[in-house]
Image (tube, rainbow, N blue to C red):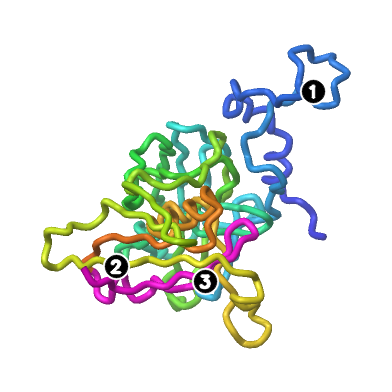
Amino acid sequence: MSAPTRRRLLAAASIGALAGCIEGMEPSSGSSDDPESDDPGSDGAPTSSSPPGDTEPDSCPTYGDNVDRVVCYDDVDDAETVLEPDDRCVEDGGSIAFTLENGSDERLQTNFYNWRIDKYVDDEWYRVAPMEHNDPLMSIEPGESHTWTVTVDQSGDDDGELPVGSGGTEELTLSAVGAGTYAFRARGWFDGDSHEESFAFASTFDFEGDRLELTPSDAISDTEWEDDVLVAHSTRGDPDDDNHRLGAFDLERVSESEVGTGDGGDERPESVITEQLFRQPRLRDVIALSIENDADDVRLEEYDATRPIFGAQSDGRYEFQGEYYRISTRELEE
């Protein structure tokens, strides 16, 4: 195992500096107000609102095949160009800034829209935001820097639409997220290098707040049972618009053997976390309805103008918290 860097040692030594981020959190049910209590649930430490069982990541995400090297803030001491956070923890309504300073002698080619935030859950990293971005070529000259400021906001309307504020180049809003460990990254390449050999500049941070619970959105207007199928109706779409057609977004809860494991050449089902489901409104609603009503089959009926109905990539197989789901879509006759 490699020796810890100076940054990682300093981060561990300064854990007390995060007290303001977790101040005022509710104690666990087994804790006592007496710091000398013999109760094994009371060790004087505040209770974390992170999901139980999660561990801390060893490093930043790897970001896939399109990145030649990941420069993770905690793992390097001698890198000329790093992404530096101004804090390591943020609360709901608070902000955290990430500054990418080009300490090299070469221009750094980049795209300030192409930032990314991932969340660490069950020993895996999951991409959360943004869903898409503009793609202009920008740059940071030697000795110059660029700063992204991320504000976390859990107070948005739960209208069943995509979370707002997920784009931009400087002031960013991160909504529909729950407590846990996240990573922010920028990327780029230096003059003289190929854009196919790009760097990811990243740093992890913690969000201390409420857990994000999976519930049906306010777009679900009513539900009813048709035999063993739970049928839900949505307010999304416009039935009076000639371009909108009525469609069915069908969920079937299945066993792992029915969706494939990837061993036989078939693709594994896509594992998703709650934050990702909030960015896929229909998938969020049908999975939440299945869990809430213990329904093996859910049909969501709503109007949509996309062709094919709900988009070409709507069908799929998913895993969420140990359960497996098959999604199919079709148009309905009125």
* Residue occupying image coordinates x 38% and y 74%: 313
Of the pair 274 and 240, the residue shown nearer to us: 240
| In the depicted structure, whether residue 193 falls above or below residue 18 | below
Residue 29: image quadrant is: top right
Whichever of callouts 2 and 1 sits on the residue coming sooner in the sequence is 1
SS at circle 2: strand
| In the depicted structure, whether residue 232 falls above or below residue 64 | above
Of the pair 108 and 54, the residue shown nearer to us: 54
Q: Gap between marks 3 and 1, in whole Å? A: 43 Å
Residue 37: image quadrant is: top right
Q: Is residue 97 left or right of residue 58?
A: left
Indicate whether residue 326 is drawn in magenta.
yes
- Image position, residue 334 (x, y; %): 21, 68
Nearer the observer, disc 3 or disc 1?
Answer: 3
* Residue occupying image coordinates x 28% and y 76%: 308
* Residue occupying image coordinates x 45% and y 41%: 97
Q: Mark 1 highlights which residue?
A: 42
- Residue type, label 1: Ser
Nearer the observer, disc 2 or disc 1?
Answer: 2
Where the N terminus falls, by quadrant?
Answer: bottom right
Category of crowding for the residue at label 3, using alpha-carbon neighbours closer than 10 angstroms: few (below 14), some (14–19), many (at least 20): many
Region in magenta = 306-334
- Image position, residue 247 (x, y; %): 29, 67
SS at circle 3: strand
Query: Can residue 102 be seen from the camera position used here?
Result: no
- Residue type, label 3: Arg
Q: Gap between marks 3 and 2, in whole Å? A: 19 Å
Q: Mark 3 highlights which residue?
A: 317
Q: Mark 2 highlights which residue?
A: 247
Residue 115: image quadrant is: bottom left
Whichever of callouts 3 and 1 sits on the residue coming sooner in the sequence is 1
